[in-house]
Image: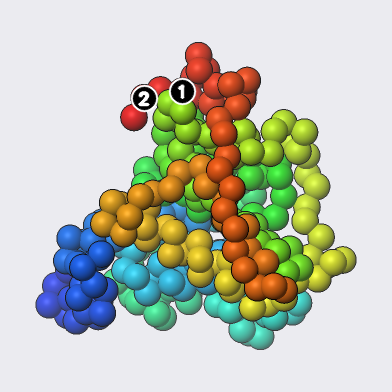
Amino acid sequence: MAETPHPLTEERLQRFARHIVLPEVGGAGQAALARSHVALIGLGGIGAPVLQYLAGAGVGRFTLVDDGDVEESNLQRQTIYTTRDIGHGKAVGARRWLANFDEKLVAEIHDRRIDANNAAALIGGADLVIDGTDNFATRLAVSDACVAARIPLLSAAVGRFQGQVAAFQGHLEGEPCYRCFVGDAFDAEDCDTCAEDGVLGAMVGWVGTFAAMQAVRLLIAPQMGAADWGSLHLMDGLKPGMRVLKIVKDAACRACAPGDAGQGEG
């Protein structure tokens, strides 16, 4: 792309003043966000609040990937779209929202389905990949591509009143990837069942905004604390509450196990 993220001019400093006064972010952290490139895979219930809050945080460059069109049933939770977007592509709508929100941010869109054949090309050059897609085959394809390209992955999922967010860096020795977490049995086009089981719109917002906060942590680490790789945050909207589990690297993982192409030291 010819464009580059906008520098932190005096005007931009004013926009992010509430970040900059935080010692955990500061001017250095804000500058790091402005230089960052995030590939956001899936622009639905999770992707919408992730985009909103990362754009608000000043992430300078986005790659936005989604092959779906906006449907009326999406509007209950996918907050970047309006009634006028129904029937139109989500990627185009997301870019329109971003341009209206902050014209200084750079975005490249891809309105095609991501899979094992094109994942590497679509995530290339990103500092962080965030996956909010709705089926295991896509999630695993994205994860495998991240391992091969040595790009960190933040994965988020939600259903009914339950959510989960975890950060992976499987290309590093001792660190798990998403495939270590779910295994190989889910390499299939079995989508989550929001249409059948339902999902609370605010629950999706909670998962998405928590994922955005984790993304900021990863992009400016260690200023906001440890990156917390391999920690699975399980979110319960009925209690409400959250608990954290540690995911262990699978020594037999076909994506990131020692001796495989994706494995190496950071």
Residue occupied by mark 2: 265
Report which quarter residue 177 is drawn in.
Answer: top right
Q: Which amino acid type is marked by label 1?
A: Gln
Residue lying furthest left: 10
Does 82 sit left or right of 190 as displayed? left
Sort mark 2 into few (<14), some (14-19) or many (20+) by Cα contacts within 10 Å.
Answer: few
Q: Residue 209: x and y, percent? A: 51, 69
Q: Residue at x 50, y 14 (%)?
A: 259
Residue at x-position 34% and y-position 63%: 59
Q: Residue furthest top?
A: 259
| Residue 257, horizontal then vertical, whole percent | 55, 21
**Quarter the C terminus occupies:** top left
Left or right relative to 63: residue 61: left
- Residue positioned 25% across, 64% down in the render: 24
Measured from the top left, where is residue 57 in percent x and y?
34, 70
From the viewer's perspective, is 177 left or right of 204? left
How many badges with numbers are in the image? 2
Q: Disc 1 on helix, strand or loop?
A: loop
Q: Amino acid at mark 2?
A: Glu
Q: Tell which of 209 and 144 is nearer to you.
A: 209
Q: Can residue 48 be seen?
A: no
Name the one closer to the observer, 242 or 147. 242
Above or below, comparing residue 32 to residue 69 in the picture: above
Q: Is residue 166 above or below residue 68?
A: above
Name the disc covering residue 194, or none: none
The answer to whether residue 17 is visible is yes
Secondary structure under the numbered disc 2 in the rendered image: loop
Residue holding disc 1: 263
Q: Position of 60 compared to 44: left or right?
A: left
Question: In whole angstroms, how far apart are the C-alphas of marks 2 and 1?
Answer: 7 Å
